Image: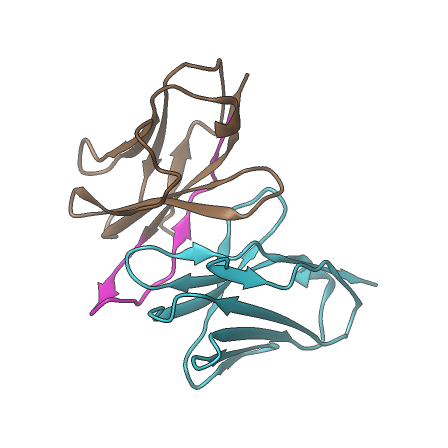
Chain colours: A cyan, B brown
Amino acid sequence: RKEVEQDPGPFNVPEGATVAFNCTYSNSASQSFFWYRQDCRKEPKLLMSVYSSGNEDGRFTAQLNRASQYISLLIRDSKLSDSATYLCVVSASNDMRFGAGTRLTVKP
Amino acid sequence: EPEVTQTPSHQVTQMGQEVILRCVPISNHLYFYWYRQILGQKVEFLVSFYNNEISEKSEIFDDQFSVERPDGSNFTLKIRSTKLEDSAMYFCASNPSWSGGTNTGELFFGEGSRLTVL
């Protein structure tokens, strides 16, 4: 089983749509969880951390279910600028393991 | 705004040659990482470094790889004898802190060094 597994995508959605990404992780000792965003041929950048109680940052909502080892990201009212690859990142110790990413394209 | 800088941005080398990729992490950060990303594939963890020693490494980080922090600023990744399959983007990242086993900060990535092995 892969350490961090994500929806393969790609997701092609119209502007204004709501889209959800899922991620599962295999290491039950994982303690820190993040969503990163990567634009084409660029470095990953932190989108948001994921907290146990769930957290929201503007149009973005992240959820964590430790029992199911599952993380989600919800994007509401998607914008053209949201087009990117979204990376689920999980950390158990002195490393941070990335999922393969889910590609999102938002179309006019 | 402080940033992680990497050099070179692109290096082309012949198979079997040694390559050194350089990184200057953000100055007050304590943890340093190398990741690689083969074109079209996932970001793969190579190694983490803390207090002048490797703290964790992946199965990819075999004997042909080494890391060093020769002075207070540079953090280098050496690939001793490059193979075709080493062609990838190599990202350096730094992290300000950990607390009690939990990563409390984000990874700050450099723009990457693209390595092409011919």
Image point (19%, 31%), residue name: B70
Q: Which residues are magenta?
A: B95-115
Rendered position, A104 above or below A31: above
Q: Between B57 and A48, which is closer to the camera in this rendering?
A: B57
Q: Residue furthest right?
A: A108
Rendered position, B62 above or below A56: above
Rendered image quadrant of residue B77: top left
Q: Is residue A31 visible?
A: yes
Residue B99 within the segment the image draws in magenta: yes
Image point (56%, 74%), residue name: A72
- Relative to B108, B39 lies left or right: right
Q: Residue furthest front?
A: A1
Q: Quadrant of the C terminus of chain A?
A: bottom right
Image point (34%, 21%), residue name: B80
- Relative to B98, A49 lies left or right: right
Image point (56%, 45%), residue name: A42
